[in-house]
Image (cartoon, helix red, strand yellow):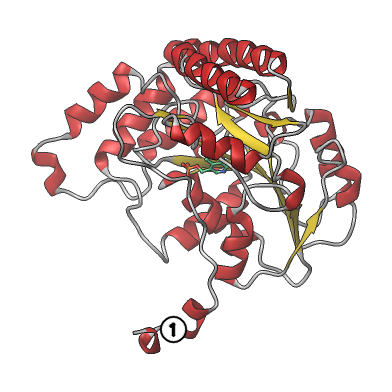
Amino acid sequence: MSRYWSAVVHGLTPYVPGEQPKLPNLVKLNTNENPYGPSPRALEAMRGEVGENLRLYPDPSADRLRQAVADFYGVTPQQVFVGNGSDEVLAHTFQALLKHEAPLLFPDISYSFYPVYCGLYGIEYQTVALSDKFEIRVDDYFRPNGGIIFPNPNAPTGMALPLADIERLLESNKDSVVVVDEAYVDFGAESAVALVDRYPQLLVIHTLSKSRSLAGLRVGYAIGHPDLIEALIRVKDSFNSYPLDRCAIAGAAAAIEDRAYFESTCARVIATRARLVNELEALGLEVLSSAANFVFARHARRDGAELTARLRERSIIVRHFKSPSRIAPFMRITVGTDGQCDALLHALGEILRG
Ligand SMILES: *Cc1c(COP(=O)(O)O)cnc(C)c1O
């Protein structure tokens, strides 16, 4: 069969997403989904799209959604690009803005899709080690590069970089694009969107999968200088003119417009996170400081893979990363409802005592 494959396919190392098990009664804390569900206004807007109009193609530039995003952040629609999940926005960004002669830089512990896109698009990269406290040190990025990308808060550590550090990086890195992947920013970090008007090399990428609880809808967006956005549009229009369907455009715009629902559900996640951190520490785990809707925690004497497997026997699914070895002791635990977190803490307590 593989004799029919293109040469490039033989060389690919695809991303492995967190599993979506089909078992009933799972406490699913492995893929950072939001436990509270989408805004009721978003659901209503999507229902309104299901009808005769689906005969027609959607708006290829999704202007209604771009306007909603622009209004939310106080930017212009020309500074906004939207795509089918931020993974697609990231893919276009790698191809449009990060493929140069000098290597792309990103942290050694980071979103594991980045090296996958480099493989797909043939982009040279170098990883930059986090500090021994798992922090991004921006000074380590002051070297020749074809672009810089990192999540803020970082994944899977959950740790946030202050905006002042990002600004320092932008001040000393004007000849290549700096991408800040803010998938989790709404849970407690400072957004770099505040800097896009001053730094034309800055691109900020967001998703509706986490803080807007729409992982199933597949919508993400980028905010940056219109020249960067134009590059993304050129790639998109060479790939798929209609990445967002009618339901996605309407639902995503309504979700962005429902600020009150967004703020209250983020606040609930943040409150539960504080309690989860305290109780994990009471069980003897070390928890990295998290500004995300997940925590990264390890036990001094118990292996992360083993604890993950023992939780799984009790129908509680968390995420474990085998590599790099520095993070093998950790579990990444999504902040669920209070009830889900209680189930996790109860099970973990039993496993650790047993
Ligand atoms: C979840 C996540 C994404 C992808 O989000 P989608 O919009 O669901 O594709 C991108 N970057 C990071 C760091 C993430 O954790």
Of 160 and 227, nearer the camera is: 160
Residue placed most toward the observer, 284 or 197: 284
Residue 76 falls in image quadrant: top right
Q: Which residue is mark 1?
A: 6
Q: Is the residue 325 above or below the residue 116 in the image?
A: above
- Residue 152 at x, y percent in the picture: 68, 36
Question: Can residue 65 be seen in the rendering of this structure?
Answer: yes
Quadrant position of residue 171: top right
| Total labels drawn | 1
Q: Residue drawn at (89%, 57%), measured in percent from left and top?
A: 143
Q: Residue at x 55, y 77 (%)?
A: 11
Q: Indicate whether 283 appears above or below 230.
A: above
Mark 1: is the Cβ under 8 angstroms from ligand 1?
A: no
Asked where in the image residue 103 lies, by quadrant, the reply is: bottom right
Nearer to me, 109 or 223: 109
How far across and down, in percent of the image, does residue 119 sit? 60, 69
Q: Is residue 156 visible?
A: no
Query: In the shown orientation, is residue 33 left or right of residue 112?
Result: left
* Residue depicted at x 59% and y 42%: 320
In-front residue for pair 323/315: 315
Q: Quadrant of the C terminus?
A: top right
Which residue lies most toward the bottom here? 3
Q: Position of residue 160 (x, y in %)?
A: 73, 30
Residue type highlighted by circle 1: Ser
SS assignment at label 1: loop
Left or right position of 68 against 353: left
Work out which quarter of the rendered image holds the N terminus and state it.
bottom left
Q: Position of residue 188 (x, y in %)?
A: 65, 20
Q: Give the residue furthest to the front.
A: 354
Badge 1 density bin: few <14, some 14–19, many ≥20, Cα 10 Å: few
